[in-house]
Amino acid sequence: MNNIFHAARRSLAEKVKRHRNKPFLEAMMAATALLALADEEIVLSERLALDFILENVKELKVFDVHQAVNLFRDYGKDIQLDAGRAKEKVLETVAKFSGDQQKAALLVRASILMAKADGDFNEPEQKVVDELCRVLCLESSKVCKFEEIVEGE
């Protein structure tokens, strides 16, 4: 009986953690999709960068990878269909973290990782990073160390 109680407690704790972190998952997938499509196509290296982000950002580890990838894909489709409206939606979703310096910086660093994944951090990508920094009330020069997204650094 004691084991059932502990298992139920762990399950409930995980569900609460997922519920609390869902807005962050949505913001992360929105921001990285926006960066991946800043140069109008998602390449393999950017998909690998997404995998790296999902494996290394501790706030995202409680989610099923397929759920995260589906969110990324959905944001990507929206951006491709109506870039202007989708971009506004992404920036609104991301702006919810403007009061949380740690998560805001993590969103930008992960986005920079996505932008640099193909080896070219081009002007459209830099503009998107600058916009993310603006809505998150961050200075881009202070968050450009994208290596810091790895847990524990």
Image (cartoon, grey):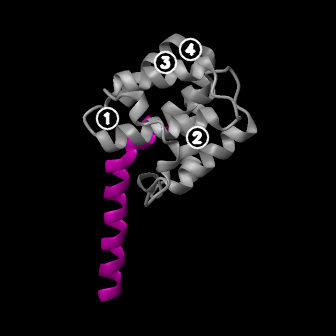
Label 3 close to label 4 by CB (< 8 Å) = yes
Secondary structure under tag 4 reads: helix
Residue 12 spot, x, y in % from top left: 32, 65
Q: Vertically, is 63 above or below 126?
A: below
| Residue at which label 4 appears | 83
How far is disc 2 from disc 1 in space, using C-alphas? 22 Å
Contact between marks 1 and 3 (CB within 8 A): the answer is no
Q: How many marks?
A: 4
How many other residues sit within 10 Å of disc 2, few (<14), some (14-19) or many (≥20)? few
Q: For the magenta stretch, what is the residue range?
A: 1-28
Front residue of 116 and 73:
116
Which amino acid is tagged 4?
A: Ala
Q: Which residue type does callout 2 highlight?
A: Asn
Mark 1 or mark 4: whose residue is earlier in sequence: 4
Tell which residue pokes out farthest to the front in this image: 141
Vertical position of residue 100 compared to residue 128: above or below: below
Q: In the structure shown, which secondary structural element does the residue marked by tag 1 occupy?
A: loop
Compute the Cα span from label 1 to label 4.
22 Å
Does residue 98 appear left or right of residue 63 in this picture? left
Separation of residues labelled 1 and 3 (CA atoms): 16 Å
Residue to which mark 1 is pinned:
97
Residue receiving disc 2: 70
Residue name at image x 46 percent, y 58 percent:
151
Task: Report whether residue 23 is seen.
Answer: no
Residue type pointed to by label 1 = Phe
Q: Residue furthest left?
A: 99
**In the image shown, does 19 or 101 lie closer to the viewer?**
101
Q: Look at the image and tell me in which quarter the N terminus lies.
A: bottom left
Q: Amino acid at mark 3?
A: Lys
In the rendered structure, find residue 22 and report the number of the disc placed on it: none
